[in-house]
């Protein structure tokens, strides 16, 4: 046994020699730090990890991780990641994308990657703005948002990433916050351990172009009243005094105050393992200020993975038809002879 084989990986082992170029105070620093920590805790071999990105501040990730990486073009990270995973299923494939890159030009790829259930991990950094191009509205910007591209206020209804992922029946869906580093690390770890497509939305602050976009969900003075943490098998309770909860009135959630005739057993109990995604989708629709916004794992279920099913089909075809060749492929089906 060599000395190298005994080496225990640390977060520093995943750091490259590149200067990290994000604005001071950017939430991306926290995400990068926790990914390195989680990878070291899990002992993920660097040569077995691939980071793929498109365009945007989040898309600098491949430069900062001492793993394999591919910096793609705008919105096409998931197409590249699909090819990487399909060609080499043994790799741990991660996609770093943003609310612009992943939900605008890349929105179609996102939907189809999720429904196929490749065993990859999608980290979507949501700051509700185009940061790299200096402050235009993104697909998640709220109605009425005034920016350089919408000086009179945005009239586009925003996309809600968690709702989109659950609508496409993602097998693992979670939301976390950049400044809650303990929860962020645990969420990344769970995503890494899930078999199938993991979709994680990270509420991330852009200190320059959209500072405080999620202050209500991250501020010490507000988050107890504006967020509810999802725990499997437990009731949805929130509030600074833990005296409020979410109850269902038919299929409509409502905020109630515990005490008197309202007991914990009357509240909605979270079930992240439910095969039917209706309740997970209902939770995804809860938004501030009407409701506390859910933080945590919405859904964690099992389903066949695309790359495994593809390999099964290839083996079945080979067993029936024999190994193929390029010559056979080019001369199969309808062919034409073109002469001058």
Image: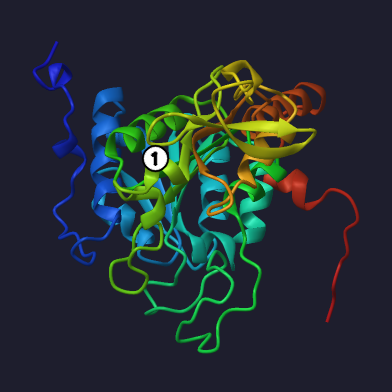
Point out residue 202 in the picture as x, y percentages from the top left corner.
42, 48
Q: Is residue 19 above or below residue 200?
A: below
Image quadrant occupied by the C terminus: bottom right
What kind of element bears circle 1? helix
Between 64 and 189, the residue placed more toward the observer is 189
The residue sitting at 38% across, 45% down in the picture is: 223
Could one spot residue 116 in this view of the protein? no
List the single residue furthest toward the front. 260
Establish if 195 lies above or below 329: above
The N terminus lies in quadrant: top left
Instruction: Look at 19% across and 59% down and name the residue there.
Output: 20
In the image shown, does 316 or 15 lie closer to the viewer? 15
Q: Which residue is mark 1?
A: 224
Image quadrant assignment for residue 339: bottom right
Position of residue 143 in the picture relative to residue 90 (left or right): right
Seen at 40% across and 78% down, the residue is 135
User: So how many labels did they put on this image?
Assistant: 1
Q: Position of residue 136 (x, y in %)?
A: 46, 79
Judge the density around disc 1: few (<14), some (14-19), many (≥20) Cα neighbours within 10 Å.
Answer: some
Residue 66, given in percent of the width and then of the height, sits at 24, 44
- Single out the residue that lies furthest toward the bottom: 151
Question: Which x, y percent locates residue 212?
Answer: 34, 63
Quadrant position of residue 55? bottom left
Asked which quadrant contains residue 268, the reply is: top right
Relative height, residue 231 to residue 325 (above, below): above
């Amino acid at each position: 046994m060599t000395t190298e084989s005994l080496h225990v990986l640390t977060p520093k082992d995943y750091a490259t020699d590149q200067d990290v170029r994000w604005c001071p105070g950017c939430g991306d620093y926290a995400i990068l730090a926790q990914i390195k920590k989680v990878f070291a805790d899990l002992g993920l071999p660097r040569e077995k990890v691939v980071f793929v990105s498109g365009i945007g501040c989040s898309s600098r990730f491949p430069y900062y991780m001492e793993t394999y990486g591919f910096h793609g073009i705008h919105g096409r990270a998931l197409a590249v990641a699909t090819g990487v995973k399909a060609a080499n299923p043994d790799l741990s494939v991660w996609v770093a994308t943003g609310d612009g890159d992943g939900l605008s030009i890349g929105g179609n790829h996102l939907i189809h990657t999720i429904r196929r259930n490749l065993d990859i991990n999608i980290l979507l950094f949501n700051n509700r703005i185009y940061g790299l191009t200096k402050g235009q509205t993104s697909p998640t910007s709220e109605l009425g948002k005034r920016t350089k591209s919408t000086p009179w206020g945005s009239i586009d209804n925003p996309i809600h990433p968690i709702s989109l992922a659950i609508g496409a029946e993602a097998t693992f869906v979670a939301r976390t916050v950049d400044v809650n580093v303990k929860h962020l690390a645990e969420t990344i770890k769970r995503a890494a351990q899930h078999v199938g497509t993991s979709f994680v939305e990270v509420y991330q602050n852009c200190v320059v172009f959209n500072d405080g976009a999620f202050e209500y969900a991250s501020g010490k003075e507000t988050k107890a009243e504006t967020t509810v943490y999802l725990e499997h098998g437990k009731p949805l309770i929130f509030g600074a005094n833990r005296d409020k909860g979410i109850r269902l009135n038919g299929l409509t959630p409502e905020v109630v105050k515990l005490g008197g005739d309202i007991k914990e057993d009357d509240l909605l109990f979270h079930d992240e393992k439910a095969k039917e995604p209706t309740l997970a989708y209902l939770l995804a629709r809860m938004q501030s200020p009407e409701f506390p916004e859910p933080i945590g794992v919405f859904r964690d279920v099992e389903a066949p993975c695309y790359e495994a099913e593809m390999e099964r089909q290839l083996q079945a075809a080979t067993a029936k038809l024999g190994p193929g060749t390029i010559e056979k492929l080019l001369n199969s089906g309808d062919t034409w002879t073109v002469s001058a």
